[in-house]
Each structure stands twice: as C-alpha cells, then as structure tokens.
Image (tube, rainbow, N blue to C red):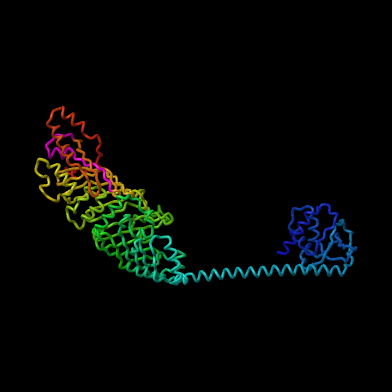
Amino acid sequence: MFLFLLTCLVVEKIQSSKWHSISSRIKLSALEVQSFIFFLHGLETCHVFSGRIKVLLRSKWLPYERIQGPSGLRERVSVPMLGHFVELQQRRLYVSRCPVGPDNKDFFEKKNGDDYNESQRTMELTLGSTISLTKKIAIRGLKIIISVMLMLSLALVGTPSILSSRLGRRSVLGLVNKFIPGHVDVQSFTLGWTKPIRAGGISLKGIDEKVVLSILKLETRASLWSLVRGKSGLGDCCIERLRVDLQEDEQSGNLKLALAVIPVSKLSSSSHRAKASMQAATKRIPSVDITLAAAVKATGGGLKVIDGKLTVRDDIAATLGQRVFIDVLLGSYALEDDDNLRQAYEMHSGLMPVKAGMWSEGTQAEAMGFIHLKKQLVKLMQPLKVEMDLSPAVAQLYLARINPLLKEVVGPAVQDEDMPDVVLNISPQDLMLPADVFMVNLEPMKAVLARGPLAGGILSLLSSGKEDVAKGKKEVGVQTSQIKSQVSIDGSVECSRIDFLIAGKVAVATWGVMNWKDETLKMILAVPSATISNLFGLNLSEGYYLKIPVGGTLEQPHVDWRAAAVGVAQLSLRQRGGKFFKNLISLLDSEETVPEPIDVIPWLSKS
C-alpha cells in the first residue's frame, strides 16, 4: 500500500513537470525513484519515457544523470538495475536532466554527511509512524470483525435455547398475539439446531375467550437446521389429541376458528339480515363431536393426526357421519399412486403433485392436481368429486342452496349401499383454487320427496276438482334431470333449468336466482302443457308452460297458489270458450321465454 501511494505521488509530479523539456530540478527521494522506475516499467505507450526505461533495464549505471546538492556536486551514487531495487538506500536525491552521450562519464561528489543523516532519520521516523498507525488500525479492525463474528455465531447457536426458554417463548407468543384477534398459548417448547422439535399444550382461543383449537402434543423428527435447509419435508410430524371447533359465530356467521386469526372486518360481508338468520339457525342446531384421523405422505417426511376430534353442527355431522379420515399424498407418492397424474406432470414440472381423499360414513370426496407454492394456488386436473348418501340433512344443508324444492327431499328412492345417492362435480373457475365462482353439477337422481310447502302446493294445484294425484300420501317419489348451477363465493346462485317428475305424473321445471347469504329468492316454477293436458284434459300447444313466480326466502319460499289456480281456470276457459276468450286470455300470458333443458330428460328419453 505504501509503495502504491509513493507511485501515485511520483506520477502526479511527472504530470506537472512537462517531461518533454525539463529545465527545473525535481526533488525526489530514492524510494520515490524506486517506485517511479517500477511504475514506468508498465508504460509501453509513452514515447518520451521509452528511451529512459530501456536504459534502466539494460544498464547497471546511470551515466547520463548526475546527482547534485544545494552546495555543489556530491558523491556518486550507483543506481542498480531494476532487479536490484531492494538495495536502494533511502536518501534524498536532486535529479536533473543531462544530455545523453556515450562519453559523458559524470561522477558524483561526496555527499554531505550531516544532510544525509538528517534526511535518513526524517524518512525513518515518517515511515515508522505510518507503519505503526497502519498496524494499529489493522489490528483494531481485525479485533472488531472477530468480535462481531463471534457474537453472531453465539446468537445463532443460542437462538434455539433462547426460544425454548420460558422468557423467549413468552416474547414470541406476545408478538404473535399482537397480530391476531385471538390468543395463542404454548405450555412447552423444545427447539434445537440438530434436535427434534417438540411442543405441548398448544391452544388457540377465539374472540369469545373459548378454545377453538388445541393440541396436546406435537413431535417431529425434523430439526431447525433441516427445516432451514428445506430437506426434512414435514419431518414425520405427529399430532396427538387435536381438537378443532368448526362452529359458526352467532353474530357474523363466520367460523369461530377463522375469527380467531383473521379480523371479522376482513371475513364478513353479509348483510344484517343474513347475520340474524344465521344467528337464529345456529341457536336451533346443536353441535356434536366427530372423530378425525389424518395422514399426509410427503417426500422427506409426512404428518399424521392421532385421536383428533372436530366440533361441528349436528346437521353437518349427519351428512359426514361419526368418523372422518383424510389421506393426502404429495410429490412422488402422488405420482406413484395415479397414472393420469404422472402423465400430466410432464406439463406441470416444477409444481408439487397432490392427491387428496376424504372418507366418512356418509360422504366421500377426492381431488388431485398440482400445488404452486410461490403463488399459493392449486391447479386441479379435474373437477372435485363428492359422493354423499342422501338424507334430510344433506337436502337441507346442501341441495336447498341449489333449488328450494330439493330441500323437501327426505331420502333416496332405492336403498343401495354400493351406489352413491348424490354425485356432485364441483368445478372452480379455470380449475384453480382458491376461486370466487364454482360450477356445481349433480347427476340425475331418484329420491323420496316429502309433501312440504312446495311439493304439497304443486300436487294440490294440479289435483283441483279431481282425485288427489298423490292419493293422500305424505311422501312421494321424485326424479330429477341433471342439475347445473353457478355458485359464487358471495352467496349468489344462478340455477339453470331443472326438471322434476313428481309422483310419476306431475312434471315441473324451475330456474332462477337466489342468494343463500342474503336469504333472497327469485325463481320461476313452470308446469308444461303435457302435465296440464294429462291432468285436466286440455288441448294445449306443445311449447306452452304455466309459469308461477316463487319469492320469499330460502327458509320460507312464497308461492301465490291462488293466482296459479286462477291461471289453470283461465286455461280451462280458453279451451271451452270461444275465440274471444282465447284472444283475451292470451294477452295475460307471460312473455318470458322458457330455457331449454340442459340435457336429455331421463323419463322422456325412455318413452
């Protein structure tokens, strides 16, 4: 570093001295000359210095330079070749340019001893102080660097112990609890760079100070170092005695578990009417516990849940059963289990394959696709498939949100343990999860329909003046066409046309919109001409439908059956009256178009 600084000093002096015609003397030290000569060795493009450089490299002496002092000529000083610069002594030189000639044999006079000693002492003191200061700075800087590295190393090594301590655990939990509405608590926690992670007494309280999630014991063979490196997967994690409360909050209608970690302002967007309705519904339906077992297989380590329980509403428990098992395959396990998933992986390389299934006493579901970890998305290969046993709980909880008439279903028409009663295919928008819009398709089904407000009203309307179509039965058979609806996350449902055959004689169709959050309903109940002709003996055109508006709420649909009866009477009058009555009544018919069936109607295809 010192030689480099001297070189820069010499260069600066050279640039300021107009080397082409030097007439004034330049005051240099022998050490500066040494650095200068070394620097000039690399200057190949400088034509002015090229001759001097060659002399320095080829000659042992400098015969064309003379060294002078302030009081005359001094002793000759030999300047060694470039390879012997280490022999140069630190002394003051006064260099001036002399003519170049082969006969010039200038020698140097004796130097003044006092001046020489003084110059040498000054240089040694300056150089010594500079080296001493540089050495002190280097040593102090090295000490600081070593101290910082040592402190960081100790902090990294001690982090697991600090977090495992009572004070460290409280500090972390206090920080977490500041960002969630609920309260997290952990009774014991063991963390190590190379030791397995263990925790016990984990609990999460909701906004009502009730526990919504608890874990008695959590163990994993993964260490902190393996998790940092991303080499352990889930670490063969084992969760014992998991308890999860999946009940809904009485005021907001959201899950209590969700309200414990997310503010209600970010979850709830339903109206006050929906909240009141949800509150009333929640109060009426008690909650029960169902058993949960889960297993996740993943590369590097999986996860399993032992002795888990879910607290759910009674109607949900009725649809699921008393036991639920969840199985999830990730990575290579999913590819080995399904050939279709393995073939599709070539187009989705870089994503994580997943195949999940859920089994219970009343419901089965399966899904497979690919997980995009960075975008937190799941790309499904096919629609979600759900198979359920048909029960009043399934009808009221799920089917009623697609069509109000399905709410009155009480069970399957034929008991068959090998065949599912209800098959749903749920397709999120673009087959991506999460999504805001879902297409729900139900395969045609045969069920038993209770004679409730809608079904009973239809049967009474079409039995006017004649024998009861259902022959006084409280339950009748019903057959449906394919059901297709678009369900949005905000609760709105657009129902395509659904055809029903009730009691084997009464064919009706429904379509319209509803919202199960706002409890609004606006649909059309249509009776085709074939049904009216068969029951009343009227001769109507093939494309005619008697359309009856349906409003109210999902809990209490409203149908003006009196107006519908007037409509049937008008049809009879049209049939028996003259041309004047036919023209007059035709003006009262609704001009609303009737949508076409979305698929072949099963009972018509057989005939």
| 489 vs 257: above or below | above
Write down the region rendered in magenta: 519-541
Q: Please give left or right for residue 526 compared with residue 303 in the image.
A: left
| Position of the C terminus by quadrant | top left
Dividing the picture into quarters, in which one does residue 317 lie?
bottom left
In the picture provided, is 297 more to the left or to the right than 390? right
Q: Which quadrant is the N terminus positioned in?
A: bottom right
Tell me the residue at 90%/63% (across/down).
Answer: 71
Where residue 296 sits: x, y (%)?
A: 35, 63
**Toward which corner of the image does residue 529 lie, by quadrant?**
top left
| Magenta segment includes 240 | no
Q: Is residue 476 above or below residue 574?
A: below
Tell me where residue 517 appears, x and y as whole percent: 30, 50
Can residue 14 be seen at all in this image of the molecule? yes
Query: Residue at horizontal 15%, vertical 37%?
Result: 568
Splitting the image into 4 quarters, where does residue 302 fall? bottom left
Q: Position of residue 19 (x, y in %)?
A: 81, 53
Residue 331 appears in the figure: no
Q: Nearer the viewer, residue 70 or 401?
A: 401
Left or right: residue 607 versus residue 323 is left
